[in-house]
Every structure is written in C-alpha cells, then in structure tokens.
Amino acid sequence: MSTYVYGITAGSHPALPEGLTGVGDPPREVRVLEEGDLAAVVSDAPEDLRPKRRELLAHQNVLSEAGAAGCVLPMRFGSVAPDDAAVTGVLAERAEHYQERLRALDGRVEYNIKANHVEEAVLHQVMAENSEIRALAESNRKAGGGSYEDKIRLGELVASAVKGKEAEDAVALERALEGAADSVSVGPESTGWLANVSFLVHRDSAEEFLAAVERIRGEMPHLEVRVNGPLPPYSFVEPGPAEPAGTAAGGTDAGAG
C-alpha cells in the first residue's frame, strides 16, 4: 500500500499523541517510520485523495500535533510514496540534508505575504508620477474624450506604468520585510497578486515581523497586503521522500490560502 507522508522529524522527537489520525475516510492511523537519526510521520495513503477542506485540515492537524513537541519538516498536502521502504530509503539517502534543515527551521514558522494594488489609488499615483500620461489624458479630455487611437495610446501607457509599479512595489515590499525574517522564498506568480513571498520567522520575532507588515501598510496605502500565518515552513523544505498524489492534490499548502 502507498504511504502518505506528513513530515520529517528527528529520531529523538517525542512520541505522537496516541490514536492520532490523518487523512482519509475513515481517517488513517498515523505512525512513525524511523531511519537512523531521522523519522517520518506517515499513514497509509487513501485512494483518490483530493484537496477537500476536511483532508487539508487533517493534514494540518497532524503537523500541528507533531510540531507542538519539536521541529517538523512539513510535506505539502498530497505527498505519497510507493511504500514505507521508499520513505526510509530517501531518509537514509538525504540524511545530512534533512538534519541540516531540522536545525535551520527549529523554532521557526512561515508567514506568506501576498500583495496587490488598490486600483484607484495606484491610478492616482501613476497619473501623478508620469507627465506623459497626464498630458495625454488632459488632451483627450479637452478633445471630448479624444480619438480612438489616442484612447488606445492612453490605455497602453497606463497599463505599462501600472505594470512597472507592480514590479517596483514587489521589490520594495520584500526589502522592507526581509530584515525581520531569517530567510525569504519568492513563490510562483499568482493571478491577482503582484507579490507572493514567504518569510521564515523565528517564533520569538513574530511580533516584530507583523509590526513591519503594519508599517508597510501605513507607508504604502496603495497596496492591499494579506498575511497568512504562522504556518509550518513549507516553502523552506525541499521536496521530500514522496511525489504528489496526482495533479489535484499535489503541491497544495494545507494552511495557505
């Protein structure tokens, strides 16, 4: 039977709560596979697993229970290996890497920051900062709206300026927050967001990091800034001893939105 992998811990990690269950209907019993100085938190993998809310929460709950007692390298939802031997084989093969990651991530959590422009506010900024756009907009206004070509030209100028502003603000956001974090991971481009960045933050520094986010909101009111966290540090763990269980489940953060 295939093996579902929740996370990787040190072999000395305290025992999990008795009767802990994970994904599946009925929920599969969670167990631990040991290999040298490492261990993997796993269960049998249910067939046809899909990223439904119940399953995502079950995955997250196992990580929360395991993480309450010490550092866990979280696997993303849908991580499935062919069998137990495949899991322990990868633990043995990559032992040095996982041990280094456990040391680096101990006591740390992830905050994912997404940002987008407040449309009206950024248009005002673009108009204020670009004399060519202002001049063409005023010319069109005086001409009763302007010709079709002038309208198209104005739209192109505005779109180009907004795109440039998106890139500029994404860099500014990352630079403003990276000083309050131990590490930064830029996520894939996401429709509707100009920035999608994860920050590795020590639990003891979380208030400082969130205060930096609030400063950004005050200094850049034309940005809508969304904070998701604290999360297990998904973005700071390289792929583990499993492959995603199909495109519907693979690569989904249980706690991210």
Image (tube, rainbow, N blue to C red):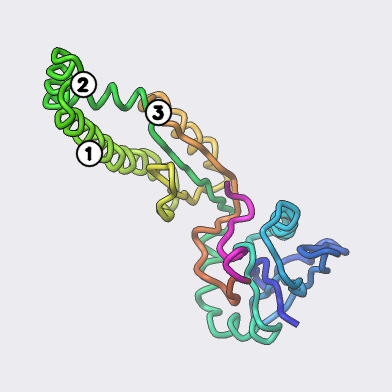
> What distance separates the C-alpha of mark 3 from that of mark 1?
16 Å
Q: Quadrant of the N terminus?
A: bottom right
Q: In screen coordinates, is 79 left or right of 217? A: right
Q: Using the image as rendered, state which of residue 148 and residue 32 is in the foreground.
A: 148
Of pointers 3 and 2, the one earlier in the residue sequence = 3
> What distance separates the C-alpha of mark 1 from that of mark 2?
15 Å
Of pointers 3 and 1, the one earlier in the residue sequence = 3
Q: In screen coordinates, is 27 left or right of 148? A: right
Of circles 3 and 1, the one toward us is: 1
Question: Which disc is residue 239 wearing?
Answer: none
Q: Is residue 73 visible?
A: no
Residue under numbered circle 1: 160
* Amino acid identity at mark 3: Val
Q: Position of residue 62 (x, y in %)?
A: 74, 59
Question: Which disc is residue 118 wearing?
Answer: 3
Dot 2 alpha-carbon crowd within 10 angstroms: few under 14, some 14 to 19, many 20 or more: few
Write the residue at 82% across / 68% down.
Answer: 28
Of circles 1 and 2, the one toward us is: 1
In what element is the residue under mark 2?
helix
Residue under numbered circle 2: 128
Whether pointer 1 and pointer 2 mark residues with C-beta atoms closer than 8 Å, the reply is no
Write the residue at 16% across / 19% down.
Answer: 140
Q: Position of residue 179 (x, y in %)?
A: 38, 43
Vertical comparison of 41 with 227: above or below: below
In what element is the residue under mark 1?
helix
> What distance separates the C-alpha of mark 3 from that of mark 2?
16 Å
Q: Main secondary structure of the magenta part?
A: loop
Write the residue at 26% across / 24% down.
Answer: 125
Q: Residue lying farthest front?
A: 148
Q: Position of residue 176 (x, y in %)?
A: 36, 38
Magenta stretch in the rendered image: 246-257
